[in-house]
Image (cartoon, rainbow, N blue to C red):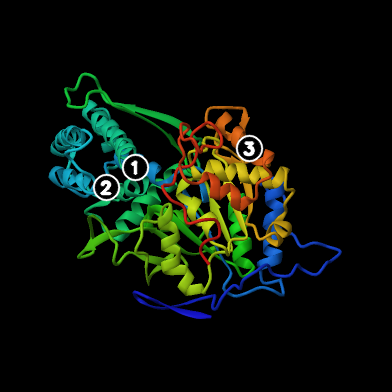
Amino acid sequence: MIVLACASGAVACSGQGSSGGGTPSEMESADVKTLYVSGTSFAPATEAAINDFIATYGKDSPDWNESAYVVCDFDNTTAIFDITYQCNAYQIQTMAFAVDPAGLRAALSSEINPEADDNNLWLDDIENAYQYLWTIYGPFTSSGLDEEAQKAIQADPEWMEFAAKMKAFYEHVEDTIDDPTACAWVLNWYSGMSEQEVYNLYMRSCETYRDVDTVDVVWESPASIASEVGVASSEFPLGVSVTEDVREMLKAYSDNGIDVWICSASHADGVRAAVDAYGLSESVHGIIGMTQKLSDGIYVPAYDWDEGYAWLNSGNGTWEKTDMAIHALPSREGKVQAIENTLVPLYGAGPLAGFMDSSGDYNFCTEFDSMKMVICYNRANRKITEGAGIVAAVAVYQQDVLNYDLASANAAGDTYYLLQGRDENGKRTLRPSDETVRLGSSEPKLFANEDNDALLSYIEAHGMTTAQVFGTFSVRCDASDPNNKLGVTYGYLDEYSGYHSHR
């Protein structure tokens, strides 16, 4: 057992040494196979893989090592839909802001160039609307308005001007800067708050929307209000939940000697709140999230590269900030860096399994050679110009052509990739399939479009290995490139460290 030094004291953590190289020996045969999870809505192959993984790498195995741990993304992976997008909407609905109008503009200007991409025009509109609302209904605080005050402010067209512009501006920022930086930029919305206030804000958001049916919401700014940008709109889903199947799976890992860590591009305080709100506190060992700079205990609009730390779940709804500095934006390559700066030194090895849904998770789920299994939650909209679109093709290829299970994949030196379907409608559930029913649809869907099918066909026709697929299709290659293999654009990285390159 390791004693992990935390900011407020020492906290015991399981795990020491290395989880070892190579493939552990197979479990001794038995007449009855232990089922650690059963009767779930996971796809049959996924449920079988979860059970095989725990049998092979959990504490019942003679090859179990105390350094065993897994790493899960949170948004659209552990949960169905995104806690940050949800909290953005909840924060606007309740006007839970802790800065005045000038402070809001300063916060929203951080991490971007106000002079580029019409950003100043957006900032003008947002500041004008917020100034009006602040004068009539403010001042605002991190606690937000009560229900009666919310009804009053939302009846004012200036609130919709502010609401639609704030949400649409976030999308504008995502479209004009790189994704990891956009994830850091949205932290600035919480400027003026303490760690506990951000935790409380996310907790209220999660509690408000975790048990509701998914609804598709459109906010559109009024044409009657003169503005620099003009009419702007934003469409987004409300309703985020963690399924009972995922709770059962994570608890099974934890109960069987495998630590569970969350590594997310959402605010660290928000992830802590979500773990507690969705009933995961008994299973999740700790979290890594986006970190915002503190000044005298209050967040300021700047990313914390130096003192942004991982958090350890010490139980009973309490958390301890560790002394493990992340020194990274935990998205894409930054997730690999964050894990290597925190968990690899702690455990002496990389993670044994990864859980993903997007390009933000692609690097850590393909680059660690310690990785035995990856479950990719199928959003059925990931193209082959995105990491998850490539992983989706690999998962189907391993399942249908290579006929892999966990043991055969690991024996071949491969990570075992699985594609897990879900239903985004109603209360949001998993499906016993690799296909997903998208929000607003009733038809299951496997891939985003025909380009995904073309990639899978090429892989099959050329009998490629998993390593060859990732080595060939990870780096962006335009359709017009003479070296292009498919005749359509694929890949999304400028450079790729390589499959199993981190040892």
At label 2, which amino acid type do we have?
A: Trp
Q: Which residue is mark 2?
A: 189
Asked if residue 273 shows in the view, the reply is: no
Q: Residue 19 placed where, x, y %? A: 59, 72
Among the two numbered marks 2 and 1 on one chain, the one whose residue lies closer to the N terminus: 1
| Residue 414 position within the rendered picture, expressed as x and y whole percent measured from the top left | 64, 57
Q: Circle 3 sits on which residue?
A: 458
Which residue type carries mark 1?
Answer: Asn
Dot 2, how many residues are within 10 Å of its Cα: few (below 14), some (14-19), or many (20+)? Answer: many
- Closer to the N terminus: mark 1 or mark 3? 1
**Between 157 and 258, the one nearer to me in the picture:** 258
> Which residue ends up furthest to the top in the rendered image?
224
Crowd tier of the residue under label 1, counting other residues whose Cα lies within 10 Å: few below 14, some 14–19, many 20 or above: many
Quarter occupied by residue 122: top left
Q: Is residue 454 visible?
A: yes
Q: CA distance from mark 2 to mark 1?
A: 8 Å
**Separation of marks 3 and 2 at Cα, in angstroms:** 45 Å
Q: Residue drawn at (60%, 27%), measured in percent from left and top?
A: 442
Q: Nearer the viewer, mark 1 or mark 3?
A: 3
In-image side of 236 versus 163 (left or right): right
Number of dots carrying numbers = 3
Asked if labels 1 and 2 touch by Cβ distance under 8 angstroms, the answer is yes
Circle 2 sits in a helix, a strand or a loop, which is it? helix
Kind of residue sitting beneath label 3 = Tyr
* Among the 4 quarters of the image, the one containing residue 101: top left
N-terminal label among 3 and 2: 2
Looking at this rendering, what residue extends furthest in the front direction?
Answer: 482
In percent of the image, x 62 and y 74: which residue is there? Answer: 65
Q: Name the residue located 26 percent from the left edge and 37 percent from the top edge.
A: 149
Label 3: how many Cα within 10 Å (few below 14, some 14–19, many 20+): some
Residue located beneath label 1 in the image: 88
Q: Is residue 278 above or below residue 283?
A: above
